[in-house]
Image: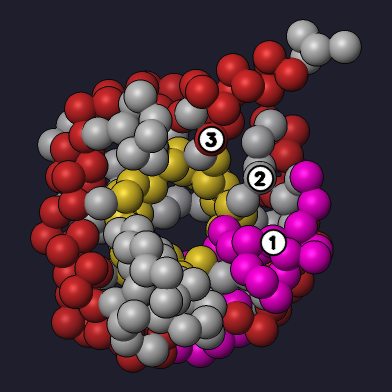
């Protein structure tokens, strides 16, 4: 198992409209994260994964975001994307493991192919306890709360903070490592995730998105 227990994993991603978009910036961000104590990196796209692989030996959770208006699933929807990310240097393949429609393999088949054909660990992003059970049953190495509050089925339960109830339920039931991800945006919430039994915690925006961090501070200047 490549993600050590008690690890902070830093998500180094920037959308196309972000001034920090691109492999040069994301590889530098990954280096800074490692220097600060990160024990894993999550990254999107072949170019970013390859650039980060060149500067660190930390385990990389690679994903491939593919937007298609016909389908709600965009995080590594099929085996083709998983294969490209693996070739770019990802140690672990992150996928959307919800049962929603996708332009790619069904979740069970996708997990199986990644494990057998690529020989990679699978990081399953889910939104509910039932999805966590299914991902584990299909052979996922890790189950993560990444999508809690971000699917149509769970949007009504989204809170400003993370879904600690889901995290605790997954930890209580699943025998695989459960990863806390999604709105863990303060050190206090990271500590709370570990108290709930998380194997590791992924933090993204609160560490690697200066634009959004600045917006949080800017809001404090308004009456």
Can you give x and y, in whole percent of width and height, for residue 166 in the image? 74, 66
Can you give x and y, in whole percent of width and height, for residue 208 in the image? 46, 29
Looking at the rendered image, the quarter that the C terminus falls into is top right
* SS class, disc 1: loop
What colouring style does the render use?
Answer: secondary structure
Nearest the eye: 155 or 179: 155
| Quarter of the image where one finds residue 174 | bottom right
Q: Total number of numbered labels?
A: 3
User: Which residue position is annotated with label 1?
Assistant: 149
- Mark 2 crowdedness (10 Å alpha carbons): few <14, some 14-19, many ≥20: many
* SS class, disc 3: helix
Instruction: Report the span colored magenta.
Output: 132-160
Instruction: Look at the numbered discs 2 and 1 and tell me whether their residues touch, using CB distance below 8 Å.
Output: yes
Q: Does the magenta stretch include residue 142?
A: yes
Residue drawn where x is 21% and y is 60% of the image: 85
The answer to whether residue 109 is left or right of residue 53 is: right
User: Which residue position is annotated with label 3?
Assistant: 205
Instruction: Look at the numbered discs 3 and 2 and tell me whether their residues touch, using CB distance below 8 Å.
Output: no
Per the rendering, the mark at residue 94 is none
Q: Distance between the residues labelled 1 and 3?
A: 16 Å
Can you give x and y, in whole percent of width and height, for residue 67 in the image? 37, 63
Q: How far apart are marks 2 and 1 (CA)?
A: 10 Å
- Mark 1 crowdedness (10 Å alpha carbons): few <14, some 14-19, many ≥20: many
User: Which residue position is annotated with label 2?
Assistant: 183
| Quarter of the image where one finds residue 107 | bottom left
* SS class, disc 2: loop
């Amino acid at each position: 198992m490549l993600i050590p227990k008690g690890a902070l994993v830093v998500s180094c991603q920037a959308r196309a409209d972000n001034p920090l978009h691109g492999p040069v910036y994301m590889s530098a961000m990954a280096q800074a994260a490692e220097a600060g104590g990160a024990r894993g990196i999550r990254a999107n796209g072949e170019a970013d994964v390859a650039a980060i692989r060149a500067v660190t030996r930390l385990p990389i959770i690679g994903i491939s975001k593919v937007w298609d208006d016909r389908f709600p699933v965009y995080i590594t929807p099929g085996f083709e994307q998983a294969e490209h990310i693996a070739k770019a240097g990802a140690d672990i393949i992150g996928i959307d493991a919800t049962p929603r429609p996708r332009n790619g393999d069904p979740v069970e088949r996708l997990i199986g192919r990644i494990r057998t054909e690529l020989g990679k660990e699978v990081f399953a992003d889910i939104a509910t306890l039932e999805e966590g059970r299914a991902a584990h049953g299909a052979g996922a190495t890790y189950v993560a709360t990444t999508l809690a509050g971000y699917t149509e089925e769970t949007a009504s339960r989204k809170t400003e903070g993370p879904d600690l109830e889901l995290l605790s339920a997954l930890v209580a039931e699943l025998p695989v490592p459960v990863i806390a991800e999604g709105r863990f945006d303060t050190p206090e919430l990271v500590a709370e995730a570990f108290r709930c039994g998380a194997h590791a915690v992924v933090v993204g925006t609160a560490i690697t998105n200066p634009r959004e961090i600045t917006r949080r501070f800017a809001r404090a200047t308004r009456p």
